[in-house]
Amino acid sequence: MFHLVLLVALAIGGAWGGEWCLFYATQSKIHGDEDRLFLKRFPKGQILQTGKFYRFLIGPFPAKQEALKLLPKARRYAPDAYIGPCPKVQPSKPSPVQRSGKVKDVQVAKVFQKKWHERRESNATRERPLAKDGKPPLKRYYNLTFYEYIDRLLHKSPYGGVEEANYELRRLEALLEKAPYNWDIFGFVSTNYSKFIDYDLAVNKEMAVRGGVGVRKRLFDRSYWSWKRLAQLRQELARMEYIDAKDRLYLLGTQLYLGALLEQRLKELYEAHYFQQKRFFEQVQERYRAGVASRIDFLDAKNDLLAIKKQLLEHIYAYLYGDYLLRNSAELDTNEPLRLSWFGVKWKEATLAEYYKRALLYSPQILSQRIKATIAAKELHSLRYFYWPKVDFNLLLFDEYRQDFTLKKRTTGINYQLGFRAEIPLFRPEEQSKIQRAKARLRLERERLKSKIKDVAKDIHKSYNEIEKLQRERQIVQDQLRLSQEKIEVSQKRYLGGVGGYRDYSEAIRQSLRYQEELYRIDAQILSNKIFINLLEGIERLYE
């Protein structure tokens, strides 16, 4: 997979001063064909190489308002995109780019911006807090965004490959509707020896050898007026079923990514609380040794620390399993730990009736079932005209050698046979049974269409109600979390001041963890339901 990197050579003067740029992303590698997708989505997009990093920019824009108009679209694919003054760079000559996509002797202007490097948007590294020796240990991460993962899952994994191969097969099978009406040109060789009694009761023996070319074509039959429409319908059905299959794969990828992302956030949450509780436990231990705190407080603090550590281990191993699922499904070829990031989707608030209406028009599940019903109706219409004639055209052009063993004569020459064959059905009882089966199938497909419409409406209604409930529930949990965090501060001060008990602090810690975990899960469920409704409506796809 090659990369098409746009290497920018700025005009003399070497500055974009006073202009605005949309900073899309910075990363150490270009994965797959994301550079093509970026430049396709954003015509004003540019990719600069800054040291070891590739910097994705959009612009420049003469006014900040123009950049703000494009910001919502950019954040659909890169949630951390932001707007700022364009960087000042020195002019450089454009580097030659080979057709294979490999950049040869790249000489791109070096961009040194302290503010940029402090944003930590690289796909390769993330700086950790200072260690005890004062040195900042660096750990390498692979920043896997949701849209990069979905793109890999749909287009580069075996799961997406199966659906694409199946779609291509179904699309080619639809072209077979035209096969009987194509010109059939063939070569042939035939030999025959005959012995027969002539009218004079003499026994004649003849041999004939033929070799040449032939042409045949179906000129007309009962499907002549419908085969083109049937071929179009079957191709459209293959496309709709392909989109529906990709929707299911999209939902599976969403569940895998959100599951791993949730465990990553919970792991970080419990890790932070573990060190916080560890520091507080050391304070309780010092108070216990000084005789200020009781043995019960010491044991409770130790037990709380171990309980948080146990939960932390559970989330660590759950995240590792989610990490494995993401690597395995997306065919990632990196050994670096994955760093997942939160993402957003395009969401338009509407009423249930509006969601139903859009799904009825654009849902691939409904459209595919509607096409199946239309195909069944067309096939029934064609079967009802079984009494129409079948007309075929045949032409043979051949060189013939013939020998008569009785008369001792032989001859050779070029001959041809030209003919039309018309077959008119008079009595075919099986056609009536085919018509009855076609009627039953048409009824079945129409009932399935009604059932599919109800199923899609039911799923939209369920997800819509779930989003409404979760959004209100989220507001409540946010208030509870704020109160629990305030309770932690108050109970900690009261305990250290000797006017409160440890159990108040312990209970506040447990409540805060529970509310924070619940808040993370609510956010993931809201996002998952929004994606589900978008797919049911037939919008927000990356693979059309």
Image (cartoon, rainbow, N blue to C red):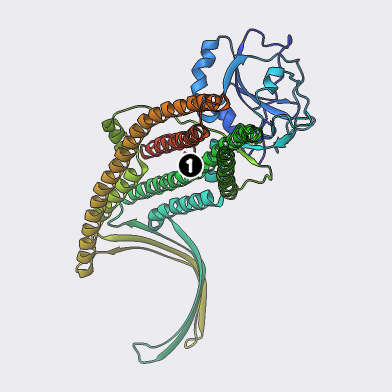
Tell me if residue 73 can be seen: yes
Viewer-side residue, 94 vs 130? 130
Q: Is residue 456 above or below residue 390?
A: above
Measuring 58% from the left and 21% from the top, which residue is drawn there? 44
Measuring 23% from the left and 69% from the top, which residue is drawn there? 430
The quadrant of the rendering that contains the N terminus is top right
Q: Hey, which quadrant is residue 177 in on the image?
A: bottom left
Identity, as a three-letter code, of the amino acid under mark 1: Thr
Residue on which disc 1 sits: 254
User: In the visual, does 244 lie left or right of 209?
Assistant: left
Give how far across and how far down residue 374 sits, in percent. Answer: 28, 48
Q: Is residue 116 above or below residue 401?
A: above
Give how far across and how far down residue 353 sits, in percent. Answer: 26, 32
User: In the visual, does 345 lie left or right of 221?
Assistant: right
Q: Hey, which quadrant is residue 25 in on the image?
A: top right
Give how far across and how far down residue 387 sits, in percent. Answer: 21, 61
Viewer-side residue, 202 vs 472? 472
Q: Is residue 117 above or below residue 195?
A: above
Give how far across and how far down residue 282 sits, in percent. Answer: 65, 34
Q: Is residue 256 above or below residue 281?
A: below
Tell me if residue 225 can be seen: no
What count of labels does the image hold?
1
